Amino acid sequence: MPDLLIELFSEEIPARMQTKAASDLKQRITDGLVEAGLTYEGAVACSTPRRLALSVHGLTSASKAIREERKGPRTDAPEKALEGFLRSTGLTKDQLEARDDKKGQVWFAVIEKPGRPAADIIAEVLEKTIRNFSWPKSMRWGEGNLRWVRPLHSILCILSDEAGTEIVPLTVDGIVSSNTTQGHRFMAPDCFSISNLDDYTAKLKRAHVVLDAQERADHIWADATSAAFASGLEVVEDKGLLAEVAGLVEWPVVLMGKIDDAFLDLPPEVLKTSMKEHQKFFSVRNPKTGRIERFVTVANVETADNGATILAGNQKVLFARLSDAKFFWENDMRVAKAGMQPWLDALENVTFHNKLGSQKERIDRIAALAREIAPVVGVNPDLAEQAARVAKADLSSEMVYEFPELQGLMGRYYSEAAGLPPEVAAACEDHYSPLGPNDDVPTAPVSVVVALADKIDLLTGFWAIDEKPTGSKDPFALRRAALGVIRLVLENGLSVDLLSSMTAAARGHPAPSTESELAFAAKWASEFSNDPAWYVARDALDFIHDRLKVFLKDKGIRHDIIDACIAMPGNDDLTLLVKRAEALSETLKTDDGENLIQGFKRANNILTQAEENDGVSYELDPKLELTEHDAEKALFAALDTAEAKIKPAMAAEDFQTAMSAMAALRGPIDGFFEAVQVNSDNDIVRRNRLCLLNRIRVICLSVADLTRIEG
Amino acid sequence: MADEFSKPTCFQEIILRLQTYWSSRGCAIMQPYDMEVGAGTFHPATTLRALGSKAWAAAYVQPSRRPTDGRYGENPNRLQHYYQYQVLIKPSPPDLQDLYLGSLKAIGIDMALHDIRFVEDDWESPTLGAWGLGWEVWCDGMEVSQFTYFQQVGGHDCKPVSGELTYGLERLAMYVLGVDHVMDMPFNDPQSPIALSYGDVFRQTEEEYSRWNFDVADTETLLQHFKDAEDECQRILDATHEDPKTGKRIVMAHPAYDQAIKASHVFNLLDARGVISVTERQAYIGRVRTLTKACADAFVQTEAGGFAA
């Protein structure tokens, strides 16, 4: 059972692509080998900045010979049929066998495919893999036509077993496979030959190359944390950065350096972002003060001066970078302290979207909307408007221009410097939140108002111009905005009439005019309004409801339960909607609840059928004196009791009480159906019973639209 | 030639060593292009010569202007006028990385002491309609060069592919010479009878141009210049290939390209004056790209561009 070792040695592969490329290599090669009839015991892929490596062990040394018989046309069939058969088998007529079959003599082809040596198959599969490899971006170089992520220099491809090692011969665009590779670019640049995987990893390590990316990352993290610990400090964890840095070095050497005192007053986020984005440094924090005081950089080389020159160089670069950051910060602070007006003015010239106007116009809309929403959250409208007006001022600042990811956060610092109220400053930072499903939701009232207004403006705006998400495309992150609205409302327990807020927001956007924009308007036209802004809002609310279903499903509430609640009035008050859904979900988990649904459905079906057949509705109050059975009387009493409980409970939005009162109907309803035949011969009795069923329906439907419950 | 690892003493020595090094590696040492450009790539020896099938090898210093980077000579690293060293070899040789590292040794960077890294940086120039894959080269965490395999220029696929190296000379030199502020860097040999620092040569001009770029340049005039260059470029390219006077086929790719360069620089000045909004910005870049693409189309119609009658 030979082992296969492949190394594709190239110029530096971008760090972010290495891991995926290694696993793609493994996938493509092993798939290809198996498809060609080889089997193997296991495969491992590794990557460094300059190499993709794959080891496949326990490979069969050849594919099995295959004997295949194929039945062809009858021997007396027309010549054409025989020709076709010969073509498809690749045989000549004298190679066919004539055999007796049920229907007469038939031509048979016996195709013998001899087994192929593993080396032949590997060469074929590897060449195909290299030529068809899918890199996120690939290139040509020199005069060649081959595409690779960066110029490919050598291909190591060997098969080894106890008997020895053989090179698998192949040539791809002039590159001839061999059994050699080279070590670290600077510390061990010479070529050396390899006999198997163990030899490969051992010789690479001697040549200052750690083959496994995880091993490099572990080494970096261990050295970095212990260096920081020795100085009473801690490394700020950043897994993405760690993976990236591990992909930038073949031989990691961790060095820790100091940040010049001149920069320690910069906000820690600025230090961290600048060091990470520009230099891929880890931040090292003083746990007592929370300040970032040092950095960790990872070099790719060991030097005679133990990295002193490298560290000094890095420190110097950092100094220049942070000087820039400080320059931005100081310039920005001047504008901030003077009230930020030039920034706000500049936003007039920044286009938000060509159909939705400038950033300035967007801010005006958000400010107006924030005033509208403010009272619901218990915020002074003036304060809400003030916060909305400055929340995006930092987009004009130099720091955010340099580091867009610091938007909002810089706004907070600058608003504080401008002497604005702390709630306003907090809103600058918080109003973009929540960004992801796990991101914290703002709770400070002013932040909540601005965050809601921001997202509602976004949603209704893109709805008005018909730029809705489709399939996987959501370029304006509207799903995120909708989920943001949902979480802001629910997690703060707000009772917001979303439909009226959204209608107000939609009035600030262009009215639907194109055919497709009008199409959704038509969808809602039969309902309560003929206001185009209302249509936009109503359709966007539908989208929010869809996101709400996904959101609640993750929380274990079934989609039919949510549908049953969405069908009720007041469904734009999401807090109420969810309270109702939760209560219903709980009720349906009880034995009474589950059976009540059956009872309700039975009542509803009988009633609906009767209504259809008779062409009348049975909405009159049933009369107690027309009852015949005890069970009928009991249901009468139970309905009276339930109604007396449900009405005030619903008025008080106490769904729990209402629903348990409804569930309590289960016994009497079941009893009624057991004892009573609705369709009595006596028309008057029958009508009275149908009216009784109607009371069941009316009472149950006042709680939720139970017709939508499945099962 | 000086010993490879010996430290150069001044800015110009670094330039001279690079010239000597690339000359000895077979490059034609060209002179700077005599127009204002934002980067060495704009020199026709790069932009146009990267097109077509003919082999090419050139190296040169290119003074470059980035009006928005002006800091009145006060920032230790930022300048609105600086020098780039540019190398273009077509087709890119297989040992281009080693050749490049050789040039670092030539200016006194000892690979045994420093950390040299090739960090992904895909290059794209929207105004040139060009892109390539490569790296920024880091020396001890500092970007000292841009290393690019051109894939497309002026909308044309590069075949063969050129390898382009761009060194930011001030930054590189400051590092090699151990200087913290660019204005303190010795320009000529500090032992010279008249020793000059970078600041002696450029501090005043940085100040003057910073003021002009940011606050004084007349935007109306610049807008007109942009339009004029755009019109002239189109007019040149619209001319018939046959010259009525000489009867020869003369495609005027280079004169047209000069106008494209001019438009590009005027755009940068307008940008520094802060009169171009975000939406307009894209439109301006698109207009310059239209020009450079048209010039590239014209160049491949010339002999140097591989055109055979």
Image: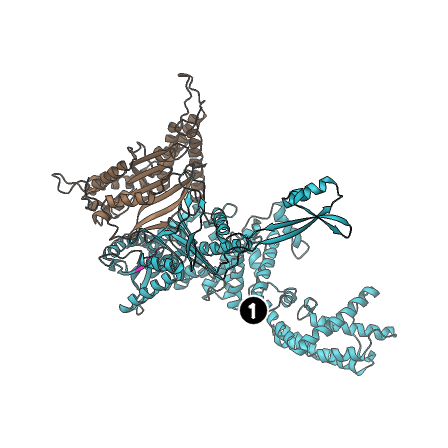
Chain colours: A cyan, B brown
In the depicted view, which residue is nearer to us: B110 or A229? Answer: B110
* Quadrant where the image shows the C terminus of chain A: bottom right
Q: Which residue is mark 1?
A: A555
Q: Residues within 10 Å of mark 1 (few under 14, many from 20)?
A: few
Prevailing secondary structure of the magenta residues:
loop
Instruction: State which chain disc 1 sits on.
Output: A
Provide the residue span drawn in magenta. A248-253
Residue A468 visible here: yes
Percent x, y of residue B37 = 33, 36
Q: Is residue A657 left or right of residue A186?
A: right
Q: Is residue B274 left or right of residue A561?
A: left
Residue type at mark 1?
Lys
Comparing A438 with B20, the one in front is B20
Q: In the structure shown, which secondary structural element does the residue marked by tag 1 occupy?
A: loop
As drawn, which residue projects farthest toward the right? Answer: A681
Q: Is residue B125 above or below residue A50?
A: above
Q: Nearer the viewer, residue A667 or A452?
A: A667
Inspect the magenta stretch and tell me whether residue A250 lies in it.
Answer: yes
Camera sees residue B220: no
Where's residue A369, x and y in %?
51, 57
Provide residue A45's location: percent of width, then percent of height: 44, 58
